[in-house]
Amino acid sequence: MSKTTLVTRGRATARAVAALLGSALLLAACSQDLGPSGSAAPPPETAAVGEATGQKPAPFDGAEPVKIAIVQNSGAGDYFQQWTNGARQQAQALGMEIQVYDAQADNARQATDMQTAIGSGVDAIIVDHGQSDTMCPLINDGLTAGLPVVIYDVEISACAPEAVETAQDDANLASLILDKMSEDIGPNQPVGYVNVLGIAPLDRRNAVWEQVRAQNAWDQKFFVGEFTNSVATDNAQLVDAALKANPGVAGIFAPYDELTKGTVSAVQQNNLQSQIKVYGVDISTADIEVMTAEGSPWVATATTDPNAIGAAVVRVTALELAEQLDSREVVFPGTLVTQDLLKQNGIQNLDQLRAKLPELNMTGVATADWIPVVSF
Amino acid sequence: MALPEVDGSGAKQTAPGPDKQAVAVARPSTGAGVREFAVRYGFIAITVGLFVFFAVSEESFRQPSTLFSMLKFASVVAVVGLGVTLTMVVGGLDLSVGSVAGMSVTISAMAMVFYAQVGGVAIAVVLLAGALVGALNALLIVVLRIPDLLATLASMFVIMGLKLVPVDGQSVSSGMVLRDGSVAPGRFTPDFLAIDRAFLGPVPLPVVIVGLLAVGTWFFLNRTRWGRLMYAVGANPEAARLAGVRVGRYRALAYVLSGVFAAIGGLILSSRIGQGDISAGNSLLLDAVAVALVGTSVLGLGRPNAWGTILGAVLIGILITGLTITGFPYYGQDIVKGIVLLLALLFSFTLSRRRSRYAPAAVI
């Protein structure tokens, strides 16, 4: 008898749980209706929207909003969150509807996402990162279906020449920082180099390094670097060993912020911060802290703002839709940030940095008088 | 359809069957009828309902191409899930399926890129490798008597690491530089790439492949002596053994088939990516087990079955595609996936008057 009661009570609990779950699902469905075009998460950094003076060209002059899709390889992490935020804000300013497909670093899923996007009735597609072997045939499918496709940071110029290729201007970033380095330490100096070859943007930075090094007749004492799951920690060990074997270098170039951080900590471990200057690429709030710390050897870095890049990619797409884009390739220039600038202005985070260096917003890149440019 | 042997398994569960029957009879018949209906068709109703909901609310969801890319998205999980279903039928669970699919991606890429083989050879090698892993799992489980979950957990790790050895932990792509400094001679062949990219009429080929495998699995499990005996083995291996069934053989067969199905899933993945992506298949295990579990609740069968698994995969496909199009963030999608799995389990374990015949706890 008691067993029966237990069974009945168990059922009642189960029904209550089922009802709860059901209402949770319903609630989730309701909250969907609040946001118009997939802005479920509140944007972390809201943008200031500039004034547009010109007449909107087709297809932006109609009553129907222009729809675009972003097919991302991964939207996770600070960088991509900011990138996507910038893209959303710029799209909103232009009155576009935007759909974001995030494959969560799953290449196969990005392929099906791209297919869904092509068939979903959007007016243009942005592909953000991905494997060129996987995405190329699909990018061509999109182009064949008559959709403009804008690519960010995928190597596709050979297989999909009709697509618009955009990228951060790595050569420009490297020249900016290396010009600063030659100015600071002068020619004929012993130098160190920390980089990992075989990764496209780092290879492009390497090409500039080879050139500038030859021009300055720098004596490269060591070249180390590896790409692992914890780049900063692992490279700190490599640089530490290299410094012990090669005393007396005047400057080190480490063109990726994780490599730079590893280099900085190795220099500090060896108590060489007064003799060695470190030059890096990229910046984050955590990097600003490292650069402005007492006696930090990291004297300058060259960088772009991911928010501004996401926004610029959307502007490129808008120009392509309006048939106002002449080139199939758009690159985004970098900005030089020095330790002196950070310290003199008491800058502690990216927001303060943007306020001090408005050129990070790239408001003059890929624009027209009818585009309200966003800045962060 | 129900098998007498299977019903007999009730004896080893906590609450004996007859009691439950009595409870149900004592209830007003309408309530019982509603519940019976919910258990039987609830899941199908949820799937159809979700589909209609997304189709009405999102214009882009209504495009026929969206339907097919959704099914295509579901196809890999569905194939691998069918393999998991087979191991669940014999009362086990194959945790190595995700890594076998990942291994297949690497092996097919190696065959074509390193050794310049044609697509057919790559497919044959991958299927053989899948069967081999299945056979090794069977050896561990049947001959060496290691519990299913533990044996396949171990082989999962070994395969995940092993596949990286010949490629030095790198993704295999055409034109890559090999260890000896030369450039890889081969590339992904068009016939191999067609596995994922070709169509049969309007239907993508992987969807056709999954359809055929589902029919085959259903026929095997429900219409052949072998299949029925596999259910019997899963329900009560001791009773099956006493009835003269060679239990070990059936369990071994399930694992070999599971390995082959995972390999087929890997072939579709490989063709979709067009590269020997080392991270491929990482998320497959959990999704495949989830859809097979969801499948147990379809039609109120309360046991693993081929159509249930397929429907589970389609449901997850609808959910993910629909939520993506509506702009639901990716971290929310996992929560919804989990809730759906829970609902399905409630249907098959809690609300169902028939006792569920799949109890994973009984595996260890």
Image (tube, helix red, strand yellow):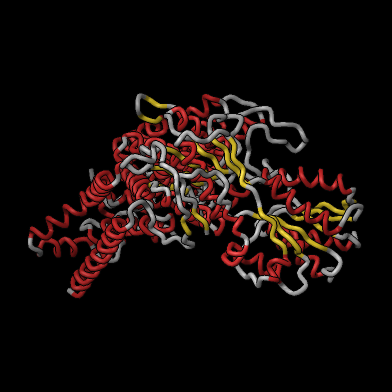
Which corner quadrant of the image does residue A298 belong to?
bottom right
Which corner quadrant of the image does residue A41 belong to?
bottom left
Is A244 above or below relative to B80?
below
In the rendered image, the quadrant that contains the N terminus of chain B is: top left
Is B329 above or below relative to A103?
below
| Residue positioned 83% across, 59% down in the render | A184
In the rendered image, the quadrant that contains the C terminus of chain B is: bottom left
| Residue positioned 51% across, 29% down in the render | B193
| Image coordinates for residue B295, horizontal then vertical, percent | 32, 48
Whether residue A232 is visible: yes
Q: Please indicate whether residue A298 sits to the left or right of residue B7 in the image.
A: right
| Residue positioned 72% across, 36% down in the render | B177
Q: Nearer the viewer, residue A358 or A15?
A: A358
Q: Residue furthest front?
A: A53
Q: Nearer the viewer, residue B203 or B296?
A: B203
| Image coordinates for residue A327, horizontal then vertical, percent | 57, 34
| Image coordinates for residue A290, horizontal then vertical, percent | 69, 68
Q: Please indicate whether residue A245 sits to the left or right of residue B79 in the image.
A: right
Which corner quadrant of the image does residue B38 belong to?
bottom left
| Residue positioned 69% across, 31% down in the render | B184
Q: Please indicate whether residue B128 sits to the left or right of residue B294 in the image.
A: right
Q: Nearer the viewer, residue A69 or A374?
A: A374
Q: Nearer the viewer, residue A290 or A304?
A: A304
Whether residue B132 is visible: no
